[in-house]
Image (spheres, rainbow, N blue to C red):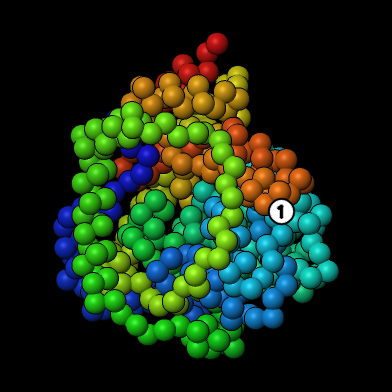
Amino acid sequence: MIAKYGKVPGFSGIMEAACGVRHGPSRLRQSILSLLGSRHAFLFPSGRSALECFLRAVGGGGDVAVPAYTCIAVPEAVTRAGWNPVLVDIGSGSVNMSRETLEASLTPDTRVVLLTHQFGIPSDIRPILELCRSKGLLILEDAAAALGARYARQPVGTFGDAAVFSFGLTKVTPAGRCGVLVLHDDTLAERVAALRVHHVNPLGNLVDFARACAWQVALHRGSYAVLRRLGSMLHRFALHQKNVPAPGLPTPVFSSCSGFVAALAARQLVDLSESMTSRRELARLYSAELAGCAGLGLCAVPADAEPAWLQFPVFVERKEACYRFLLRQGVDLSWTYRYSCGESYGVPTTPHADHASRHLLGLPTYHGLSLEEARLICGRVRASLRP
């Protein structure tokens, strides 16, 4: 079975990270600052924790424009930080908000725009940036899945006032429980630093080491095939659902990630350029092989964008039939969101996000997937579309 995600960097890489626990956080911060040219970088246990800490540092509350097609944990974190999420529709045929959908959703109380680069595909940044600057709005780039992506030859995450990245095990550079907040403003950086708790879980390194080893084993071709088929037999999940926002979530402790995960994330950054080359080659192949297929539409990508391609999203008319067919053929598709936050929050003005939740599937693009395997996937996708 072709897995949906790539591995962490082998057991040798895991052991290398384990030996570099002490200097892992400083190495990761310096690597991020060097890569992006930012002034400040803070490490967190997750991207959503970094997002919430930023909003608390801004303070004062108000409305935050949030894409309606995103993880529901994002608007939940906005609420938990004392702000009000306003759900913004994505563009037609896209996975990101457009200037037009954003402008239509702005309120007198909007102070922050969460500019998401979903699945590693940059938003059309320039027109959105012009709109936000004309209205004095702060921009927080949600680049959790877009490390390595570029727009107009500039790294994503360097356009706004701040940016959030993630090194979660399902992201472009998988390492574990780690999020990074980068920003330029010294005053905001001081406020973020004041909110953080310098507390180290003595078991954190051991737990994250065990998680990385388990992930490595689970995504081995043989074991993954067994685990995936067993899971599909035990639990047949719905390919579209309506999530209910979780009430009363506890406020997180704004601590750092473990030294082990930081060291492993820094190790992953060494291979980022190679990973981007591989992912973009796979995306070009998918585009060429699947363009014009009846019952399938490619996702819109801005002309100036160089995506990181966390996955290759496609709109499939008969989503469930395609997914079940490919699973039987040994092709496991990447997760896309099976819900729209617009529907979850009862917002009636997000039809494109609602459509994406019902029709998007993600083809795997992880570094290590060969072009021959990708061609095989394309052939099976075309077979799944036949009447």
Residue type at mark 1 is Val
Residue at x 66%, y 40% (from the top left corner): 354
Whole-percent x, y for residue 67 in the image: 65, 54
Quadrant in which residue 184 is drawn: bottom right
Quadrant of the drawing holding the N terminus = top left
Question: Looking at the picture, does residue 253 appear above or below residue 1?
Answer: below
288 relative to 30 in the view: left or right: right
Instruction: Count residues near mark 1 (Cα–Cα under 10 Å), then give few for <14, some for 14-19, many for 20+.
Output: many
Residue indicated by mark 1: 88
Residue 95 visible in rendering: no
Q: Nearer the viewer, residue 62 or 96?
A: 62
Whole-percent x, y for residue 238 in the image: 50, 33
157 relative to 377 in the view: left or right: right
Whole-percent x, y for residue 271 in the image: 32, 57
Whole-percent x, y for residue 363 in the image: 45, 35
Residue at x 38%, y 66% (from the top left corner): 178
Residue 212 visible in rendering: yes
Residue at x 62%, y 38% (from the top left corner): 356
Quadrant in which residue 159 is drawn: bottom right
Q: Nearer the viewer, residue 177 or 288?
A: 177
Q: Give the total of numbered labels.
A: 1
Question: Looking at the picture, does residue 246 appear above or below residue 132?
Answer: above
Q: Residue furthest toward the front?
A: 248
Q: Nearer the viewer, residue 91 or 253?
A: 253
Quadrant of the drawing holding the C terminus = top right
Question: Looking at the picture, does residue 268 appear above or below residue 138?
Answer: above
Residue at x 62%, y 45% (from the top left corner): 340
